Amino acid sequence: MRFDFADLLMDVLDRRASDLHLTAASKPMVRVRGRLTPMDDYPVLDATDTREIVYSILTNDQRQRLETDWQLDFAYSIPGHARFRVNAYFQRSALGAAFRLIPAQIVPIDDLGLPPVVHDLCTKPRGLVLVTGPTGSGKSTSLASMIDEINDTREEHILTIEDPIEFLHGHKKCIVNQRELGGDAQSFGAALKAALRQDPDVILVGEMRDLETISTALTAAETGHLVFGTLHTQSAPSTIDRVIDVFPPHQQQQIRVQLSIALQGVITQTLIPTADGSARVVACETLVPTPAVRNLIREGKTHQIPSAMQTGSAHGMQTLDAALAGLVRSGKITQRVAETRSSTPDELRRLLGGGFGSSMAA
């Protein structure tokens, strides 16, 4: 290795980057405020460099799993400074790796810019809360803030199942047990089934990937647990559809009924560069299942949910377009950028009153 890897990671911290990419035939690349840029102070890496770097931070067991599966998720720490979620993988017969920075401090809900209804979701005694959005949209950060608030305010047992463990939670008013796939558990589904026998009050499922995990999470939410989970969906209505579509057709009506009872909220979020380019800000779509929304879920009329969200602001609901419009009005983001993130730009322009923000759109 032609440089000290610990120094490279500290450089990533200094640049306030969210991600580091190591790949053969390229300099190390960092993502800063959503954009990838090369680290010009470092050499172009070859296949030997990337292999040496990745293998230097793996245990023997992790090396075996990487060579067997050709990819590996794990966490890596610089004690006293930072943690990274890492995915190592083979590409064109060389090793590559993506490092996602996990902030050392858990940021409170209000400081993240999440809507006030998120506080209400942290008080629910039971049910299913889904935090969704594309990769890199801040789902893990939001969930960590919600778990931390519960840890501060309730006297319960919190159990997390993650791949890998990202934010570290200490015991406060709650006890917090965190299980990592590969080290503490074989799969999300198996760990979640076991969780039901471990007397948890709150369960965090790092990713709801398959039928077994989603089915068990729904059962847990129905049987008196507060369950948090994530999905890679782009809107609250599509989240409902995704959960239901995982199941075979003959089960879907039963799942609609279960979901209509168990669901407590859906938060769909995306991170957007600020108008001055100095940071990113979160825009959230929020769905709160009122009796009318629960009825739409039960009857399979998810296409009508956006209309209920548009008129449900008194219940804490908002569409992504409404969130984007609010950020444009406050001057935090430009209208041009907001329109690129909206699935219905015409609706966004209507909310903004036509020409609003045109001076900032340039």
Image (cartoon, rainbow, N blue to C red):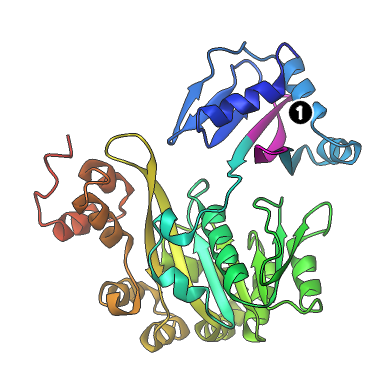
Task: State the SS at label 1.
Answer: helix
Please name the residue that numbered disc 1 is placed on. 54
Q: Position of residue 342 (x, y in %)?
A: 30, 52
Residue 22 visible at all: no
Quadrant position of residue 153: bottom right
State which region is magenta. Answer: 78-98
Is 83 above or below relative to 182? above
Q: Position of residue 214 (x, y in %)?
A: 64, 70
Quadrant position of residue 192: bottom right
53 horizontally vs 15: left or right: right
Few, some or many C-alpha atoms within 10 Å of disc 1 (few <14, some 14-19, many ≥20)? some
Residue at coordinates 75% horizontally, 24% vertically from top-left?
Answer: 53
| Residue type (three-letter) at the residue carrying disc 1 | Val
Is 26 above or below relative to 223? above
Q: Quadrant of the C terminus?
A: top left
Residue at coordinates 33% horizontally, 76% vertically from top-left?
Answer: 304
Q: Nearer the viewer, residue 324 or 10?
A: 10
Decide whether residue 30 is among the magenta residues: no
Decide whether residue 94 is among the magenta residues: yes
14 horizontally vs 205: left or right: left
